[in-house]
């Protein structure tokens, strides 16, 4: 399943995916071939699952496009 938002807010992105990993048995798969940055490891002192580095973030000031979050999830 692809989870994607047109936002770079961790509350809409990593928090949602972290819940899916922790409580729904989902696994985050690495996205290849798309430029971007890794998902966040933590935000405001809250640690996320190490798998979330496999998510992809784009930033307007770095990638010269809108900010997006993309995550490829697989049910275990």
Image: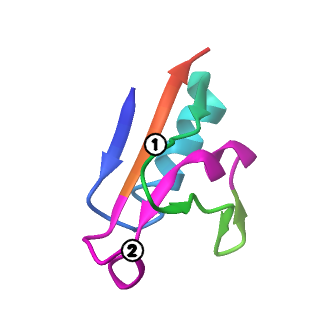
Percent coordinates x, y for residue 71 in the rendering: 46, 42
Dot 2 and dot 1 residues touching (CB under 8 Å): no
Label 2, secondary structure: give it. Answer: loop
Label 1: how many residues lie within 10 Å, few (<14), some (14-19) or many (20+)? many
Image quarter where the N terminus lies is top left
As drawn, is 57 to the left or to the right of 27? left
- Residue 9, compared with residue 17, is above or below; it is below
Q: CA distance from mark 2 to mark 1?
A: 15 Å
Label 1, secondary structure: give it. Answer: strand
Residue bounds of the magenta highlight: 48-68
- Residue 10, compared with residue 63, is above or below; it is above
64 part of magenta stretch:
yes
Image quarter where the C terminus lies is top right
Q: Which mark is residue 46?
A: none
Percent coordinates x, y for residue 39 in the rendering: 57, 58
Residue 27 sits in which quadrant?
A: top right
Residue 69 sits in which quadrant?
A: bottom left
Q: Which residue is mark 2?
A: 59
Give the total of numbered labels.
2
Question: Which residue is located at x 47 percent, y 62 percent?
Answer: 36
- Residue 8, compared with residue 73, is above or below; it is below
Of residues 26 and 55, the one drawn nearer to the viewer in this rendering: 55
Of residues 41 and 38, the one drawn nearer to the viewer in this rendering: 38
Percent coordinates x, y for residue 61 in the rendering: 37, 85
Residue 65 sits in which quadrant?
A: bottom left
Q: Which residue is mark 1?
A: 71
Question: Which residue is located at x 52 percent, y 54 percent?
Answer: 14
Residue projecting furthest to the top: 76
**Reading the chain from its start, which is encountered first: label 2 or label 1?**
2
Question: Which residue is located at x 58 percent, y 39 percent?
Answer: 30
């Amino acid at each position: 399943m692809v989870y994607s938002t047109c936002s770079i807010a961790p509350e809409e992105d990593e928090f949602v995916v972290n819940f899916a990993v922790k409580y729904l048995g989902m696994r985050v798969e690495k996205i290849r071939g798309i430029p971007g940055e890794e998902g966040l490891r933590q935000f405001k002192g809250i640690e996320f699952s190490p798998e979330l580095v496999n998510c992809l973030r784009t930033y307007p000031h770095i990638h010269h496009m809108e900010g997006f979050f993309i995550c490829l999830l697989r049910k275990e």
